[in-house]
Image (tube, rainbow, N blue to C red):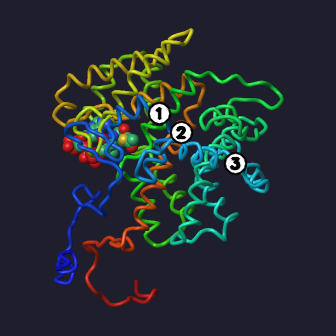
Amino acid sequence: GIDISKVLSDTGFVTYDPGFVNTAACTSAITYIDGDAGILRYRGYPIEQLAEKSSFIEVSYLLMYGELPTAAQLTEFSDRLRVHTLLHEDMRRFFEGFPRDAHPMSVLSASVSALGTFYQDSLDPFDHDQVEISTVRLLAKLPTIASYAYKKSIGQPLLYPDNSLGYVENYLRMTFGVPATAYEIDPVMAKALDLLLVLHADHEQNCSTSAVRLVGSAHASLFASVSSGVNALSGPLHGGANEAVLEMLEKIRLDGGDVAAFVRKVKAREDGIKLMGFGHRVYKNYDPRAAIVKGMAQEVLGRMAKPDPLLDIAMQLEEIALADDFFVSRKLYPNVDFYTGLIYKAMGFPPKMFTVLFALGRLPGWIAQWREMIGDSATKIGRPRQVYTGAPVRDFIPLDQR
Ligand code: ACO
């Protein structure tokens, strides 16, 4: 019955652990990672099996409710999502207000926050029915918001959702379709995108998920918490890396394609550059998601009429890095972001949308973790301690004497 952390803090001891490298902030039954062995499981199911046999909606259900749905449960859940895809008409005006070159991740987080203002009667984190409807609203509407953010950036009219379509198909049509023109969905592209969303759906206590939990621990609403998660994900050390990888590959190409020279610069820490899409706090082995994505990149890019020279640069980079002691000794392997950007590019998404696609995938994970946190009697408001390093006590000096 002794609360060790309370005893330590009462006696003046605190744990100093920048970046929470070794501090667990919660217990969780959702996702299991063994970083040394390169293992990832959602609710006990290996990611490889889910990638091969499941779908994004089924995985979302699994993450949030703990078990795979029966056929009837899956149909009911999908149907529920389908009827909630529309945004309130007044929300359309928000998209008019953003500058055309606004980063879609900023539009996304602002819109998720704003979405909460339309549902002020259902924001109670402790009311089960309100949490259920907020869950459905967020999952159903995020693709609509994401496609509106994109349409705004290219100056095209917004397209209403077509609820006869599946989740991913609907999103692709809203993104790449044009009003009054038939849009043919490419089933290979839809399947590939669905799989990428599955691979991103949860990753235990990563930066954005921790942000969602921390904000939620203050009993902020699901919308407010998820909006914070989107903002955390936008950083280039986190979800923003998929956009940064493509910029890096493009820069190498424009500089003449000398991959070995670029790796030398990374090793010399020239201008602080890193090999984007490499390294992970937890994986000290090949990221199992990256292995799946790499196979997919070759398949999807192989269908293109003209090969993308960036795929070749990426494969050379990986080969050189994995044979180099700098990367080997630091256990730096490709992470999930290393090849995803190339696939998104082949699908027709501009780099600015890459992290938005990550957010669409991570959403069920954020929601599942928020719900677990709210339902956990051990949850307390997140409030890290600090080690004070500032000035000792001193007397105030009046302005005319400084
Ligand atoms: N390129 C070159 N060197 C690297 C890289 C990299 N991508 N990543 C880490 N290192 C080096 C560090 O400089 C450090 O070297 P040192 O010990 O000589 O000082 C060592 O490897 C350990 O790295 P840390 O920064 O301490 O590792 P940390 O766990 O804090 O960071 C992170 C992990 C942020 C992912 C880091 O590897 C990185 O910045 N990678 C590039 C960005 C990226 O791809 N992010 C996506 C992460 S996955 C995701 O969000 C989906």
Are the residues flagged by discs 1 and 2 in contact, CB closer than 8 Å? yes
Q: Residue at x 52, y 69 (%)?
A: 125
Residue at mark 1 to residue at mark 2: CA–CA distance:
9 Å
Give the numbered dot on residue 83. 3
- Earlier along the polypeptide chain: callout 1 or callout 3? 3
Q: Residue at x 53, y 36 (%)?
A: 354
Give the numbered dot on residue 196. 1
Residue, disc 2: 357
| x, y percent for residue 74 | 54, 43
Asked if 134 appears above or below 36 in the picture, the reply is: below
Quadrant in the rendering for residue 293: top left
Depth check: give the residue in front, 258 or 108: 108
Depth check: give the residue in front, 187 or 241: 187
- At label 2, which amino acid type do we have? Leu
- At label 3, which amino acid type do we have? Val
Q: Residue at x 22, y 66 (%)?
A: 16
Residue 306 visible in the current orientation:
yes
Residue at mark 1 to residue at mark 3: CA–CA distance:
24 Å
